Image (cartoon, rainbow, N blue to C red):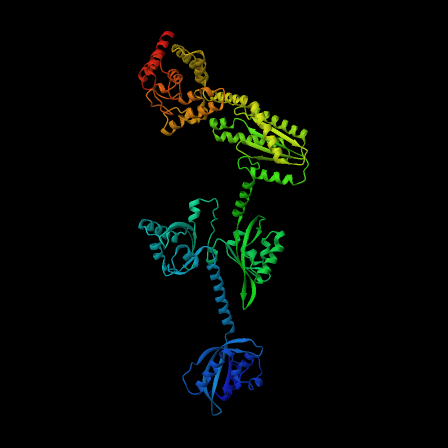
Amino acid sequence: MVVTALDYEQIFATSPLSILIYQDGLYRAVNPGMTRLTGYTEEELLKISFADQVHPEDRYRVVDNTRRRLAGEDVPDSYEFRAVNREGDVLFLRGFFSLIDYGGQPAILGQLIDITRQKQAEEMLEREKSSFLTIIENLPCGVVFMDKDERVIHQNVAVTEMLGYTLEDIPTAGESLLKFYRDPAYRKKVEHIWNADAKKPVKVRTFTVACKDGSSKEIEFRTTFLDDGRIVIAIFDVTERRRADEQIRVSEAKYRELADSLPELVFEMDVNGLITYANNNAYDFFCCTKDDLKKGVKGIDFIVPEEQAKAWQNILKSMRGEKLGSVEYMARRKDGYTFPIVIHSSPIIKDGRTVGLRGIIMDITERKQMEERLKVLSLRDPLTGLYNRAYFENEIERLESGGYSQASVLMCDVDGLKIINDSFGHDSGDDLLIAAADVLRSSLRDSDIIARIGGDEFAVILPNCGQVPAERAFSRILSAVEKYNAANPLIPLSLSVGFATTKRPLDLRDLYKEADNNMYREKLHQSRSTRSAVVQTLVKAMEARDFNTEDHAERLLVLVSDLGRAVDLPKQKLDDLRLLAKFHDIGKVGIPDSILFKPGPLTFSETKEMRRHCEIGHRIAQSAPDLALIADWILKHHEWWNGKGYPIGLKEEEIPLECRILAIADAYDAMTSDRPYRGALSHEEAVAELKRCAGTQFDPRLVKKFIKYLIYSR
């Protein structure tokens, strides 16, 4: 087929490319594609220099290539450059140039392709990649990316700061195994787990990792296996959390791909506040779905209504470049649940202008709960829930300066608390303190300030309360105590109460001292009766725990009395000996039933616990005037003649005579009575056992007198 000049003209005119002929610095011919590209008419282009339309930064290069081509030098036939159209817009072009003869003179034939959109897309992709890497680099956790061959292709700065290793130190997963886990056995275990996770991934693993400086850390690895074979690992230093076993534990999040592997919520929004991107964690975070975000959701829609105006103002400030730092809000999920969050955000800049906002959201519920607990602990007594002494002191200062003309102060002290603690344990003592707090709460007004100011002391400020209302409050407290004791006869509550009232210019500190003095006088008046009541309570508790105690005590009184008379003890000593026989085991009220009534032999630790009843009984007796004179005997009633007893290890005459008498009588009665762990022995068997233990456990002379007494009495 022959192509005519007319055909060439038709191709030139209809080609989708922009075609030009350039000679002597001017256009000689242009096709319609050139007019569409540049915005100029054909007549205007033929009057314009081609070089003037080239971008100033590329002009020298294009003109130099043209000059060299016209000179016959070897230059590239195709290259990219920028041009400026009639509107002043910058165009990215790819030109294909060749040397031709035009009108008998050398000329340049150029064919241009507009690649502006391609270039803009490449730049946008690069910016998005940079933005993502910026997020990764600024995360507080370490992030590692590996390809499908387990080569490390990127790690952020946090990894190096955490472990000391650079990308060059750990280029592959295999190299990290060698350096992270220096013990071969542990390394083999980790490698086995890693291989298993590759087949059936487990999102979270924690291992002990060797750092570059030789130290070790507990590191949590959160791994995501992507569909294309790549692996994303988020790394957290949980060393301190493991050591302290802190109550604050981060919730496990599901990491999927790239930003979705992070536990925080990552988001982007446009200038109108619409969310344009959120990682998958957002769906659980705000209880929403992908469809919810696709419909067009504003970021402030997830903030409680009363804070939305403030949130929008902060969004605008951040977009203007103001540094807000961390900002806290109350968030609202789709289901209506609210919780505290903190947001870190920064503007998204494209082509020199702000097009939106990018940030990270963290749930700070646990932190807020801890702050609230600490706030409560700073004002409240943790046992009773009443105000503490520090709050009470502050209230005194506040009320003195608050214009009150009248007030009363009431002081309370729990009687016999030490005996209860020593006998029944501190749990029972704590229960008694809680009961005292409940009595005060139920007897006083909501406006009254009730505080626990010491171990067993309570103080109350009654604002705007005179003498008569204070006396009524006093009566209500006593009535509440009686009501409590009627319902709880085992461990009765006894309160010493004193109060004081003033109409003078308010000086609560003086009033506090006066009420305290009144309470102390009340305590002195009833201290002996209170302690006696507590002791009687302990006796009842002891009898209630052992069905045989009362019969045992009666038999023991007869045995010790007869043996005491046999060794010529005076009447006063016999009376004290009988008191010892009755109360020598009072310390057993502090021994657990599981030990006291165990049917079989006691273990070493159980025996050690059982032997504490001597010391417990000693403390109880010292606290009760009626028993104080036998407190020393209660402590020593399990000492042995040969020094192998407890708790002191006394021997022979070092052991009080009364204790030696009690030991023989108590042993005989115990042997001839049924016990949880065995049946009763016969008289003959018990006597034989006493003879066997004479000189070791028992005073041998007293054993002879006791057996002689038994023979005469039978």
The picture quadrant where one finds residue 631 is top left
- Image side of residue 465 versus residue 532, left or right: right
Quadrant in the picture for the C terminus: top left
- State the residue in front, 372 or 273: 372
Q: Quadrant of residue 483?
A: top right
Q: Is residue 212 above or below residue 485?
A: below
Q: How many marks?
A: 0
Find residue 269 and report its horizontal and vertical position in percent. Answer: 56, 60
Depth check: give the residue in front, 237 or 202.
237
**Residue at point 61%, 30% (across, down):** 515
Q: Quadrant of the N terminus?
A: bottom left
* Place of residue 354 in the rendered image (x, y in percent of width and height, measured from the top left): 56, 65
Please state if 87 lies on the left or on the right of 640 as rendered.
Answer: right
Name the image quarter holding residue 33: bottom right
Q: Nearer the viewer, residue 21 or 678?
A: 678
The residue shown at (48%, 31%) is 426
State left or right for residue 483 relative to residue 596: right
* Residue 600 location (% of width, % of height): 37, 24
Residue 209: percent from left, percent from top:
37, 51
Q: Residue furthest bottom?
A: 104
Q: Is residue 714 visible to the viewer in this orientation of the structure?
A: no
Inspect this view and state whether residue 38 appears. yes
